[in-house]
Image (cartoon, helix red, strand yellow):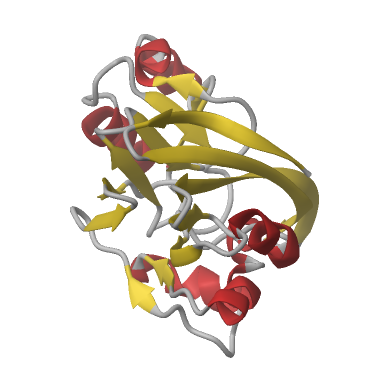
Amino acid sequence: MTGGPAGSAGSARVEHLVTSGTFDLDGGSWEVDNNVWIVGDDSEVLVVDAAHDAEVIAAAVGPRRLVAIVSTHAHNDHIDAAPALAARTGAPVLLHPDDLPLWKQTHPGRLPDGELTDGQRITVAGTELVVLHTPGHSPGAVCLYSAQLGVLFSGDTLFHGGPGATGRSFSHFPTIIDSIRDRLLTLPPETVVRTGHGDSTTIGAEAADLPVWIERGH
């Protein structure tokens, strides 16, 4: 696990953890490193994607109130630690309902605590994050955008170098392209993109390559 501050603005700041485990889908299993993002201040925080290790994430949250555990989508590597973290902290797990079929593959006996909807606003430490429904990588994939922080938490929808993978069940390449073009590339170009895996980027850095992604088909 690695971690540390990843930028701040106003009263809230963004903290970063990397946790490791497996991604399992369609009968395959792959070792992955996941970015876990913690947004808030010294009193309260929100966790974006409780991946792999509830104990490590809970330790990073510490005594602060955990407002919510937001799941950008329901692939197992982004939600496997969510119920355990919720049990430790009392925080609700939030997911877009279109990803319930994927969620149930990992947690068949435990539903999320609440739904994410397009345009929903979540406030933590005086900072507002807007839910953007960005299907394609999965049907219920979402991103979180904070104009105050100048940050987009993109889950597996947008990465440095292109869109999230669409070669497996529940995914669709034309849909993720529509989501990125219509919902994300319209944000200010200086917006920092905090991704679900790997390095951060900016909207402006990625926007010019949209035609390249469409041409290559992934």
Q: Nearer the viewer, residue 49 or 179?
A: 49
- Within the image, what quadrant is residue 37 found in? top right
- In what quadrant of the picture does the N terminus appear? top right
Q: Can residue 218 be spotted in the picture?
A: no
- Please tell me whether residue 58 is drawn above or below residue 133 in the rendered image: below
The image position of residue 127, as x and y in percent, is 28, 45
Q: Splitting the image into 4 quarters, where does residue 49 fall?
A: bottom right
Q: Position of residue 123 (x, y in %)?
A: 27, 55
Give the farthest residue toward the left.
Answer: 119
**Which is more toward the observer, 82 or 185?**
82
Q: Residue at x 74, y 65 (%)?
A: 55
Q: Residue at x 62, y 60 (%)?
A: 62
Q: Vertically, is 145 above or below 91? A: above
Q: Residue at x 66, y 58 (%)?
A: 57
Indicate whether 81 appears above or below 158: below
* Residue 186 versus residue 99 in the image, above or below: above
Count of numbered badges drawn on the protein: 0
Residue 143 visible (yes or no): yes
> In the image, 142: left or right of 84?
left
Seen from the viewer's position, the closer of residues 32 and 138 is: 32
Where in the figure is residue 201, as x and y percent of width and height? Answer: 49, 20
Q: Which residue is at 69% across, 59% downward? A: 59
Viewer-nearest residue: 162 or 9: 9
